[in-house]
Amino acid sequence: MTLASLIISIIALCVAAGNLGWQLALYLLNGPRIQVRMEVGAYGRGGLIAMPVENVKNLTETFASFEQQGFSQTALVVRVVNHGRLGVELLDFGIDVPRGVSYKPVAEAISDTPMPYVLEPHREGVWAMPFHYAVSLVEASKATWPNETHPIGAYVRRAGGKTVRAKQTLPLALESTSSTE
C-alpha cells in the first residue's frame, strides 16, 4: 500500500508542477509584448523608405542613396510591433543616449498615427522624426560629456510608466552626418 501511495504522490507532484508551469506561461503570454526597432529612413515621393540600423554600413552613403531615389527628408524611424494578446497604449516615443539625455518630438513627429495610440495585438505602428534632431542630441551630449561615445537608442513609453527600448543603437559620428541636417 505504501508503494501505491508513493506512486500516486509522485504523479500528483508532476501534475502540480505542470500546472504551475502552464499558469506561468499564460501569465507571460497573455499581456501585451511589444518590440521596438530603430531604423533610418527618408521621406519623399509621397512615402517613407526605411532600413534597420544594423544594416547601415555608412550613414552618409545610405542617405545619399535615398536622396538619389527622390527621398530627400532624412528621418529616424521607430517601429513598434505588438506580439502579445492584448492591446497596449503607447504614450510617446523618442530617442536617447546612454547617459539619460533624451529627445521627444512634440510638434514635428512624422506619422499618420498621433500619440497616445492603442496598438492592438499583432499590429505595428511606425513613427518618425527629422534626423537632424538626432544630430542635435549627440552634439548636446558631446558638449556635456566630451570623452564618451553617444550611441542613439529609440524608446516608446507605455501607459503605466514602463519604457520599452530598442535593442539596436546607432553610433553617430558627427563628422559624417553634418551634411544630412
Image (cartoon, rainbow, N blue to C red):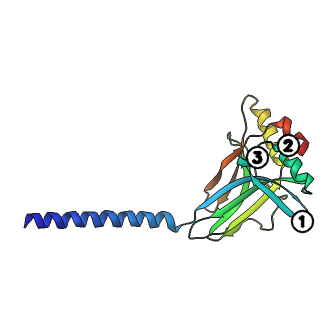
Residue at coordinates 63% horizontally, 58% vertically from top-left? 35
Relative placement, left or right, of 162 versus 22 is right
**Residue type highlighted by circle 2:** Thr
Kind of element beneath mark 2: helix
Residue 92 placement (x, y as % from top left): 72, 59
**Residue type highlighted by circle 1:** Gly
Residue at coordinates 42% horizontally, 63% vertically from top-left? 24
Q: Name the foreground residue: 57 vs 144.
A: 57
Residue at coordinates 87% horizontally, 58% vertically from top-left? 43
The answer to whether the residues at label 2 and label 3 have Cβ atoms under 8 Å apart is no
Q: Nearer the viewer, mark 1 or mark 3?
A: 3
Residue 126 placement (x, y as % from top left): 74, 62
**Residue type highlighted by circle 3:** Val
The total of numbered circles placed on residues is: 3
Marks 2/3: CA–CA distance = 10 Å
Marks 1/3: CA–CA distance = 23 Å
Residue at coordinates 85% horizontally, 38% vertically from top-left? 176
Relative placement, left or right, of 20 versus 127 is left
The residue carrying mark 1 is: 46
> What label sits on residue 9 in the rendered view?
none
The residue carrying mark 2 is: 60
The image quarter containing residue 113 is bottom right
Residue 64 placement (x, y as % from top left): 89, 47
Marks 1/2: CA–CA distance = 22 Å
Q: Which residue lies furthest to the top in this view?
A: 147
N-terminal of the pair, mark 1 or mark 3, is 1
The residue carrying mark 3 is: 56
N-terminal of the pair, mark 1 or mark 2, is 1
